[in-house]
Amino acid sequence: MFKAYIVDDEPLARDELKYLLARSKQVIALGESDNVEEAIADIIELKPDLVFLDIELDEDSGLDLAKKLEKLKPAPAIVFATAYDEFALKAFELNAVDYILKPFDEERIGKTLEKIKRMQKMGDQDFPISSMKNSQNGKIAVLVDERIILLTIDDIVYLESSEGKCTIETMDQKHKVSETLVVLEKKLTNTKFLRVHRSFIVNIDFIVEIEPWFNSTYNLIMKNGSKVPVSRTYVKGLRHILGF
């Protein structure tokens, strides 16, 4: 049974979401709030597994609250529940596990809960999802459609995020996965992977050439022929790792 907290400035929306979560028989709502200040205090005290978070609050921003929640230990998994789909990309950059739109749909909420359960199973015994450890046996578990597949870490060339969706490219395949780049980066901590761009993480073993580009940026030529951009923000780190 998941423990949830709801943040929304519309009482009817909170009531509707509580009703649908109760019907799922998988979630108990520990509390609710209509503002960031009260929500953060309650969440620290109650330690929910999940936070269903509206983005456009009356006087606050749900995105700001999400940034604060990311710093908690343990941090709750965040599901944005909002009427505004234009914030989807930003939401996934903040490590949200899902993004559901109003008016809420019972079937869609059910899919969200199933996704969270699959992600929980792929991690260690602790919830929430943001605390999942990278694989210690040389493999990484990822969600592809409705399946959990295991990829050999050494086979991954690079990871790319585009419009909130992440693609993992190996030498001979591309996998469109459900996790965000932020989540995957945490799984790959202390490995040979390096973030070189807001949207790219590369396996340094597959870099065969560093191509100077404009404005002190670079392109990385990968072993499979792909080109990966290096933004100015990450040039210093790349130089330090590769010594050029």
Image (tube, rainbow, N blue to C red):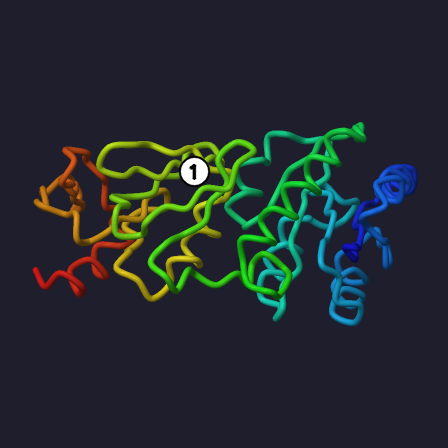
The local crowd at label 1, few if under 14, some if 14 to 19, many if 20 or more residues have their Cα within 10 Å, is: many
Whether 69 is drawn above or below 102: the answer is below
Whether 236 is drawn above or below 156: the answer is below
Residue at the location (37% across, 61% down)? 137
Q: Give x and y (percent) for residue 128.
A: 63, 60
Q: Between 106 and 220, which is closer to the camera in this rendering?
A: 106
**Left or right side of 57 for 31:** right
Q: Give x and y (percent) for residue 207.
A: 14, 47
SS of the residue at dot 1? strand
Number of numbered labels in the structure image: 1
Q: State which quarter of the image contains the N terminus.
A: bottom right
Q: Between 207 and 81, which is closer to the camera in this rendering?
A: 207
Residue at the location (81% across, 45% down)? 8
Whether 19 is drawn above or below 33: the answer is above
Q: Give x and y (percent) for residue 62.
A: 68, 48
The image quarter in which residue 19 lies? top right
Q: State which quarter of the image contains the C terminus.
A: bottom left
Q: Between 163 and 26, which is closer to the camera in this rendering?
A: 26
Residue at the location (59% across, 53% down)? 121
The image quarter in which residue 56 lies? top right
Q: Give x and y (percent) for residue 66.
A: 63, 54
Q: Amino acid at mark 1?
A: Cys
Residue located beneath label 1 in the image: 166
The image quarter in which residue 15 lies? top right
**Left or right side of 90 for 85:** right
Residue at the location (43% across, 38% down)? 166
**Left or right side of 42 for 75:** left
